[in-house]
Image: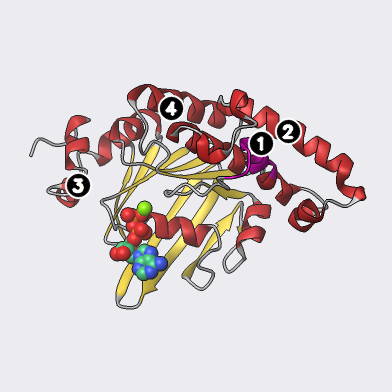
Amino acid sequence: MEPVLLECRNVAKKFGGVQALSGVTFAIRRGEIYGLIGPNGAGKTTLFNVLSGIYARAEGRFFLEGRDLTGLAPDEVAACGIARTFQNIRLFANLSALENVMIGRHVRTRAGVIGAIVRGARTRAEEAAIERRAIELLDYVGIRARANDAAGSLAYGDQRRLEIARALATEPRLLALDEPAAGMNAAETAALRRLLERIRADGITILLIEHDMRLVMAVCDRVLVLDYGVPIAEGAPAEVRRDARVIEAYLGGPIAGDVAAAGAVAP
Ligand SMILES: Nc1ncnc2c1ncn2[C@@H]1O[C@H](COP(=O)(O)OP(=O)(O)O)[C@@H](O)[C@H]1O
Ligand SMILES: [Mg+2]
């Protein structure tokens, strides 16, 4: 069995009276595609926000390859090897696809983000290397032809691929994707599936939030199910979809149909 890459211990997060997460404990092995599912409002995105340093004051601890990242700022977490995409796409709409990826790359360079903005003479050679790598990444996710187009003008599925390229530019150990198939048609989702498998084959572990149950069942090695912020099941997709608590959590929920379509429940 592969060693643990990410470990979460008792992560909890409260918003006023809403306990968005509580007692979230799990471990992701190196090389896994680990799914995170649950009805809307279950706390999935909140967990990503904790793991990416946005909620530095959440309770609990999390470790990447044994290193405690709890309480670090987002740029520090990124530098340690966790990259994420956003459920609501966050690209610089007026910048080109290429520039959006180059911005992601700067977390790995000496000159850093400030250097990227100031563009001093010392950074020019580095800048050329960053551009070459960014083009490679656009090619890798399949949108190299769009390199010079404004990010905001790309088709929705291509914007999601661009977000993945930008996240990969930070050279993560763990790539966390928040509903990457949202808004994609069947062909785009199939291409996304191949991309996820390729990313994993290239040595990057993936944490996947996804409502498309067919995709989850097809690519995930294991799945953690959250309901009202609490883990209710963990295991292989085929086991989890037979779990009585999981079926109950999804019944009547907005994605019950998706689960049923994947053969999980017959309400
Ligand atoms: N920034 C926030 N402020 C207040 N409440 C929030 C915030 N973010 C999320 N919540 C609440 O936390 C719960 C979990 O939300 P979220 O993590 O977005 O769920 P999911 O991604 O699983 O749909 C929901 O009840 C949501 O309304
Ligand atoms: Mg969400």
> Mark 4 — residue?
193
- State the scheme by which the image is colored: secondary structure
Using the rendered view, name the quadrant where residue 96 is placed: top right
Indicate which disc, 3 or 1, sits on the residue closer to the N terminus. Answer: 1
Residue 1 makes an appearance in the image: no
> Which type of secondary structure does the marked residue at label 3 adopt?
loop
Disc 1 marks which amino acid? Leu
Label 3 sits on what residue type?
Pro
Tags 3 and 4 in contact by the CB under 8 Å rule?
A: no
Disc tally is 4
Q: Residues within 10 Å of mark 4 (few under 14, many from 20)?
A: some
- The earlier-in-sequence mark between 3 and 2 is 2
Q: Earlier in the sequence, mark 1 or mark 4?
A: 1
Determine the CA span between mark 2 and mark 1. Answer: 10 Å
> Magenta residues?
94-102
Give the number of the disc on residue 254.
3
- Mark 4 within 8 Å of ligand 2, using the beta carbon: no
Which quadrant is the C terminus positioned in? Answer: top left
Distance, label 2 to label 4, CA atoms, is: 23 Å
Measured in 3D between alpha carbons, the distance from the residue under mark 3 to the one under mark 1, in whole angstroms, is: 36 Å
Tag nearer the camera, 2 or 1: 1
The residue wearing badge 1 is 98
Q: Which class describes the residues within 10 Å of circle 3: few (<14), some (14-19), or many (20+)?
A: few
Q: Secondary structure at mark 4?
A: helix
Q: Quadrant of ligand 1?
A: bottom left
Determine the residue located farthest toward the left in the rendered image.
267
226 vs 90, left or right, is left
Q: Residues within 10 Å of mark 1 (few under 14, many from 20)?
A: many
**Gap between marks 3 and 4 measured at Cα:** 23 Å
